[in-house]
Amino acid sequence: MRRRTAVFTAVLVLSIFLGRLTVLPGTELALVWPASGVGLLWVLRARARREVALAATVITVVAAVGNGLTGVPPVAAAGLGVANVTISVATWLLLGGGQRGEPGPLSAGVRRISELYRFLGACALGVAVSALVGMLALTATTADVTWSTGVAWWLRNLAAVVLVVGPSLLGSERFERPRRAQLAEGAVLVVLTVVTLVWVFGPAQQLPLAFVPLALVVWAGLRLPIPLAALEGALVATGALVLVRTGAGGALASITDPADRGLVLQAFMMLAAFLALVLATVRAQLGDSLAAQALARREAEDAVEDLRILVEALPVGLFVVERNGSLGMHNLAGATWLHGPVAVAPGQTPLEHRLLKRSLQGRTLAHDERPSVRALLGEHVSGERIISEDDAGRERIVSVDALPLHNGADGEPDRAVLVWQDVTEEHEHVQRLRRARTRSDRLISDAPHGVVVVDATGHIQQANRAFATMFGRTEDDCLGAPVWALAPGLEKEARRYLDDTVRAAGELVESEWTVPDGPSGLPMTIATSSRHVTDHLDGDEILINVVDVSERRRYEERLSFLADHDVLTGLPNRRRFEESLSQHQAVCARYGPRGALLLIDLDHFKEVNDTLGHAAGDHLIATTGAILRDGVRQSDLVARLGGDEFAVLLPEADDASAETVAAHLVEQIREHCASLDGVHRRVTASIGVLTFVAAAARQGDVLALADMLMYDAKDAGRDGYVLLTSEAHRTPRLGARMEWRSRIEHAIENDLFELHLQPILDVAQGRVTQAESLVRLRDDDGTLIPPGRFVYVAELTGLAPALDSWVLRHSIAMLADLQRRDPEFVLEVNISAQSIGHPDVEAALVAALEEYGVAPSTLVLEVTETAAVRDVAAARGFGERLRNLGTLFALDDFGAGYGSFYYLKHLVFDYVKIDGEFVTDAHRSPMDRQLLRSIIDVARNLGKGTVAEFVTDRTVFELVRELGVDYAQGYYIGRPVPLVEFVAAHLSQPVPARGLTAATAQD
């Protein structure tokens, strides 16, 4: 701002000096006062109010000092200074100066004639106000103050303002820069102007041609840019001033009165400057208008072209229909719907002939129903769907929009626009969705289980009949109700469940509920599965499937009970008992041994079944279970282990209390059976009793020890008990069984067992293709001891896996020898329940197969049904592992145990060995024959082979062959014999000649 102030101050001083050079004698008034223009220009260009105040102060001081230096009295000089600043400040205010936050007046210049008039009007008023102040100041001098003096003041200052400020304002950056040709034309015009001014206003020129230079001003205003035109006006004004003032030439010099001459000269200068500004501004405004019009025309043309391109690029058909119904225009997409021209019939239009239309029901649209006709009548048609055909003749579904355009003088549309969009796929998709929704609604409605849809607040939006019936309501009763209202007391849980479903974000959330008071008055168990679905149109919903699982839950509870309890007596079964026994032994291991175990077996029970039938036996078992349960405390555990065998666990008993309980139970069972008729009277109980302290002292298995004690009780005459306490020595019988354990271990270590083979006949081929390996023990005197004497001891003492491993190794070695004579020969080997899943047994089997090179598929492992049922999961896992190896399995003694089809489904086996009880008397008992036939049919339908055991004579053999048994085994086929005898009897002859030779000989 300092630099601007210095520059304007210097120019202001120079302009005062120049103005004083034009002072007329006798008036003390200059012909032109450029200081007025410089001061106003400074104020108008000021950038802040502070600068305006500074400029006003400098203008006042400089003007007063300048006038004072020329001899004007001090009072008059001060008044003239105020008059000078009045021009600047008054014009600044009239132009809107001083408004907060806005740039200075006309800071961007003037471009329109109205702006120029506003500028000139403000200057004229500002100079008029200053003339009043100036005239007052001149009264303090010797000058003659008249009306002509005031007019001269007004003209000289207004001319100076127009000359100085006008070109500056018009020379804004908003205007175009002059072209080179315009600059050249301007230079020529300057030379011509100078020549003309000298010719018109030069010395000794008297012709009244002062108007000629104005023609050049007009030329500049009409031809040159605004800045050059404004300079041309200034050149003419200042040139005339200089020539008239210095040379006294031209028509103006002929005016004798200096005051009059000054007024005329000032008016001329004003006219030249004003004319240049007006013409240049008018020309600029006209140029702007023409440019704007050209720009608007170009933009309109571009918009039309863009619109045309967009219309042609639209994927939908676009048609314009004239008032007479003819086609005005169409785009490329619309052409695919137009058919060839057809002669126009009365009352119909060409477009309606070329666009085929039918309703969605296939009906041809009437003339007044067609969208274009309706639009030409002023109707707005939106999204109406009809059937049309494209130019390929394909029937399509289209959506039609029709709008009227440009209403004429009569108020009716001049034309209409049709939008033709192919929505076939969308329509078909919507129809599919609608059909799917109908199907889903029907499925929900007819679903046999409950289906309910609730909103985010838990209120029911839809419910099917099954759901409403489940809760004893109607479908209408359910709608709008909160879902927890159907299950009072579960509101908190239901709200939490719905929140969990929403948080799951579309994942399935399942739960199970017990409704305390169902429609029947009983608790109802329901299973729910829910999923949260977000729909931007219908809002969030939760879909819930509800199934009444009350019966299933009761069935599962029943199955769970049956899994742990005996069906006949309701007592815990062997599995449950072994779990409880394990838990008690864990307590003993931690806190020391305590309690006692009783193992109970009924004497002569088989006679009841054989004589009175199984119904009587079942009744005896059930009543015995009740006697045992009533004979002990609630904290004691009574279980049925199987058959006629029971166990009692006394968790807190010592020797004395255990003996008391045993004696009491023996007496109770004796008295109960004595009260019954027939053979029941002979039934008594043998009980093995031992305390866990005694078992710990002998480091034996409690069940094995109790079983031995029970057999000791039987050997002692039955109807009693044998007690093993912590202080008692081993009884002779218990010692004998413990001795058997040592003998078994010794026999395993020294290979004292022998294997005999019993032949198995392939009924279809009529020859022995398989054999069963049976273990025997050779006594010191050479007598063969059957497995019934020692196998159960091995199982009781935990030696069964070791014994089975020995049998498997030697059986596989024997099979390798047999296959040298018959490569396809198959050997069956029995394994006990304890060996199922035992890692040592599996390892021994795999090692032997690898050692002797025997194919696993020629080895059949026999597992009894009762052994497999003890732990179905273990049996299944064991079977699957060895099945992957290639080994086959036979389910031995089928029917003698539980006989459930569940085990046929879940156990891994290849053969069913039918228990001899169903085979021996099948030729005499229709029931046995029917049961035998049923077992064979089931096995065949499952793809399993069948082996009939206990085939003792030809009649039985013929029967099983007739029923379709695959293999036969029994004394009629052959007895168990050593390997050498087996080979001689069954494998010594060539394979095709073998058959029932040995069996026939026995017969």
Image: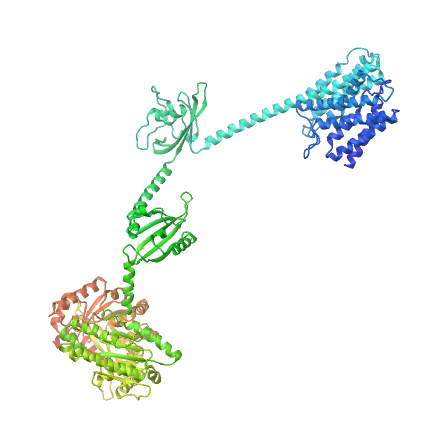
Quadrant location of residue 847? bottom left
Quarter of the image where the C terminus is located: bottom left
Name above or below for residue 171 compared with residue 246: below
Q: Work out which residue is located at the far right of the displayed protein and give it.
A: 71
> With 211 as the anchor, is 844 left or right in this view?
left
The colouring scheme, among rainbow, by chain, secondary structure or one colour, is: rainbow
Instruction: Give x and y (percent) for residue 853.
Output: 31, 73
Instruction: Give x and y (percent) for residue 35.
Output: 80, 26
Quadrant location of residue 515? bottom left
Name above or below for residue 206 compared with residue 186: above
> Residue 778 or 247: which is nearer the viewer?
247
> With 644 as the anchor, is 318 left or right in this view?
right
- Number of labels in the image equals 0
Residue at image coords 30%, 89%: 729
Name above or below for residue 104 compared with residue 928: above
Residue 840 visible in the displayed image = no
> Residue 994 or 25: which is nearer the viewer?
25
Residue 396 visible in the displayed image = yes
Instruction: Give x and y (percent) for residue 502.
Output: 42, 52
Residue at image coords 73%, 31%: 45
> Residue 911 or 892: which is nearer the viewer?
892
Quadrant location of residue 272? top right
